[in-house]
Amino acid sequence: MTTSAREVDPASGPARGQHGSKSGNTATVWSRGFALILIVNFLLSLAQYMTLAVVPVYAASLGATALLIGIVTGIFAITALGVRPFVGPATFRFRHSLLLAVTAAIILGAFVCYALSPSVPVLILGRLLHGMGMGFLAPVALAMASESLPRERMASGIGIFSLGQAVAMAAGPALGLALVGLIGYQGSFLAGAGIVAIALALSFAISSPPPVEKGPLKITWARVVAREALPAAVIIFFLAGAYSSVNSFLTVYAAGLGVPDIGLFFTTYAVAMLVSRPAAGRIADRFGLPAVVIPGMILFAVSFVLIASARSLSAFIVAAIVSALGYGVCQPAIQSLALLSVKRERRGVAGSTNYMGVDLAYLVMPVLSGWIVSVFHASGDSTLSDAYSAMFLWMLLPVGIAFVAYIVVTIRARIRASRGNP
């Protein structure tokens, strides 16, 4: 398609009836390129989630203290954020398929470090490499997926694309720990390396348009950050920040309450996303992004009330389903908002800008959430579990900020569209 990004209200998505009969009802998200990038992204995400469960335990087996384990796991996000400024410029200078192959090769190197690491410093080197690779993977894979999608099917296509990560989230940790029990830590990491190697081989089968530039790599502010995608990055910062409190503290919170098998929360969350995201994408394509994002944010807020009041596994399972219908649905919709805000050749920059918001959220918000727990617990008026419960209720604030920001972005976009401005 040659439709300019300026012809569509990015906050609402493609309007019904704007496309011709050839594409309106017959356009499909499925193509060879889309299927391949979906598989590659799934395999690399699966390997990542395998290490998410195994690396901390392996670090402890090497004698790492609790603080050092935190450094080993957290340094991944730091390097992922550190490479973001180079992602946008690289998407202008190199074929996206080449960037994908190099990214997979870097991640493969990380798994080799994991498998061969005799000490924590070598394990940290692996985490640094893995963070660099994943820092490139997310925006590059997202840009390649968008290149393979008809514009009028962007929301549903990105929703389907993100399902690979949902499946990896559900299966990866359990697979990694199961492999440790069967073949040990080194065997588990080598199995992960094999998965990454398959992804690397498949990446060579994906074609992508030639780069728009030649010559030296040019790093400018406009190539690092897509100004048009900043509203989406701000919105996802608050949403991802709120959800990071769940990733960081839900297990500890449930343990303090004596709730067993809390891992089922995350499995249920992933399964609920598998069901809800395709339907949400179709709704967004037909009625616009607000039809998905607004109720999704409301449900996301409700999920924190449910988590804060949960005292049994069944209550947490209900909260997981509501959270998946909330944040799980909003995340790909906001990604679509970022991608639709720019022209096709700048989608790599837009994707990188969006993920900067996620990276910053996961660096800042868990610390803030932990501080809130400490403040409530130190007051002496509440137990530790009550302090965690209060913290989850405080997460309504960032969700509320994201909600207001999205309403403002939507209203401003519609005002500009009514005036005939881009």
Image (tube, rainbow, N blue to C red):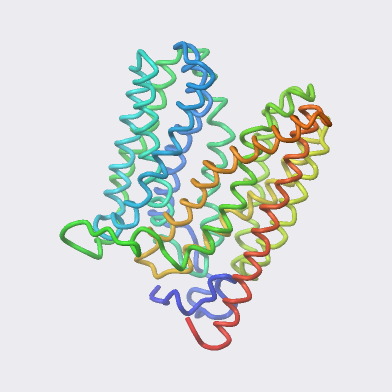
Location of residue 186 with respect to 300 vertically, above or below: above
Please report the residue visible at 55 percent of the width from the left and 82 percent of the height from the top: 416
Location of residue 125 with respect to 318 vertically, above or below: above
301 left or right of 127 in image? right
198 left or right of 170 in image? left
- Give the x, y percent position of residue 318: 78, 40
Direction bottom: furthest residue? 419
- Quarter of the image holding residue 207? bottom left
- Give the x, y percent position of residue 360: 50, 47
- In this view of the protein, which residue sits in the foreground, 379 or 157? 379
Q: Is residue 270 visible?
A: no
Location of residue 415 with respect to 72 vertically, above or below: below
Please report the residue visible at 52 percent of the width from the left and 65 percent of the height from the top: 153
Please report the residue visible at 38 percent of the width from the left and 51 percent of the height from the top: 140
Number of marks in the rendered image? 0
155 left or right of 391 in image? left
- In this view of the protein, which residue sits in the foreground, 137 or 277? 137
- Give the x, y percent position of residue 255: 73, 23
Direction front: furthest residue? 379
- In this view of the protein, which residue sits in the foreground, 192 or 406? 406
Please report the residue visible at 38 percent of the width from the left and 75 percent of the height from the top: 2
Q: Is residue 103 visible?
A: yes
Q: Quadrant of the N terminus?
A: bottom left
- Give the x, y percent position of residue 191: 41, 23
